[in-house]
Structures are given as C-alpha cells and as structure tokens.
Image: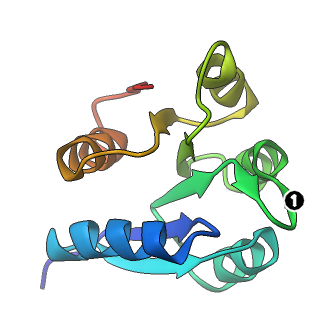
C-alpha cells in the first residue's frame, strides 16, 4: 500500500478549505481541514502531518506566530504560508518566521498543485509568492 502524505489545511474560510481539499484529495493526499489556531494545535497534537497549508489571517490568532510555534515544535514540518495579502516583504517575513514556502491567494488549481508538490519534494526548498 502506498503512503499518502498528510496535509493540514488551516483556513477560516470554508470555501477555501473545501477548494483546496477537493484539489489535493483528488491527487491522493490525506487532508484534514480546520479553521482556527486552536483547532490547528489540536490536530497537530493528534496527527503527524507532512505539511501544513496555513492562512496567515486567522480569527483567533496570528498565523505568523503559529508558523514560529510549529517550526519550534516540528522542525521538519513543511509549512506553506498563505494569504490574500502576501505583498511587499510579507513572503520574506513568513520564510524568516519558519515557513518553507509561500502562496498568494487566490490561487489556481495548477498553482496549488505545484506549490504542494514542490513543498513535499525532498529536493529542497521552494518559495513562490
């Protein structure tokens, strides 16, 4: 049996989570979606994820703080920081905080697939804004 990478999607917009889930589960990834920092922490404590797709604007906390927290607790976790406001130095700040890569929203299915595939590739780091 093949291993399906486990991805946690953290986004407070259900339509965005559903869109990402539909694209990625169709490609064979195991998806868990949550909408808050609180639920992200709970999910991380219960499941060993390979990657997290993390919206930086969440209703109950700062996504950048969660990036730092996840990086400290899970040093090998792949973190894709996402935002509809990923402009200026924001991508560099997210990478400095511990994100592996960034993705500006809205994103096309092709951009999402490429970002996740690149994120999970063992060949190294990829950063797309």
Residue depicted at x 36% and y 28%: 124
Quadrant position of residue 43: bottom right
Q: Which residue is mark 1?
A: 61
- Number of residue marks: 1
Residue 86 sits above or below residue 89 on the image? below
Residue 44 appears at what percent x and percent y? 66, 74
Q: Quadrant of residue 89?
A: top right
Task: Give the x, y percent position of residue 46.
Answer: 65, 86
Callout 1: SS: strand
Residue 111 x/y as whole percent: 25, 41
Q: Residue at x 23, y 67 (%)?
A: 23
Left or right of residue 60: residue 99: left
Q: Is residue 40 above or below residue 110?
A: below
Which quarter of the rendered picture does the C terminus lie within?
Answer: top left
Q: Residue furthest top?
A: 88
Residue 94, x across and y down, in percent: 67, 30
Left or right of 27, for residue 62: right
Residue neighbourhood size for the residue with mark 1, other residues' Cα within 10 Å, grouped as few (<14), some (14–19), many (≥20):
few
At x 74%, y 73%, the residue is: 36
Residue closer to the observer: 113 or 88: 88
Which of the pair 83/123 is nearer the observer? 83
Tell me if residue 123 comes above or below residue 8 in the rendering.
above
Of residues 125 and 18, the one nearer the viewer is 18
What colouring does the structure picture have? rainbow
Q: Is residue 40 left or right of residue 117?
A: right
Does 59 sit above or below residue 96? below
């Amino acid at each position: 049996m093949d291993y399906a990478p486990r991805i946690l999607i953290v986004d407070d917009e259900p339509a965005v989570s559903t869109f990402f889930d539909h694209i990625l589960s169709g490609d064979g990834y195991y998806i868990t979606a949550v909408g808050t920092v609180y639920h992200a922490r709970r999910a991380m404590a219960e499941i060993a994820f390979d990657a997290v797709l993390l919206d930086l604007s969440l209703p109950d906390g700062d996504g950048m703080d969660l990036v730092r927290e996840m990086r400290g607790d899970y040093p090998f976790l792949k973190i894709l920081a996402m935002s509809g406001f990923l402009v200026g130095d924001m991508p560099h700040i997210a990478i400095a905080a511990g994100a592996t890569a960034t993705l500006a929203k809205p994103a096309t299915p092709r951009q999402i697939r490429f970002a996740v595939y690149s994120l999970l590739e063992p060949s190294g780091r990829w950063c797309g804004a």
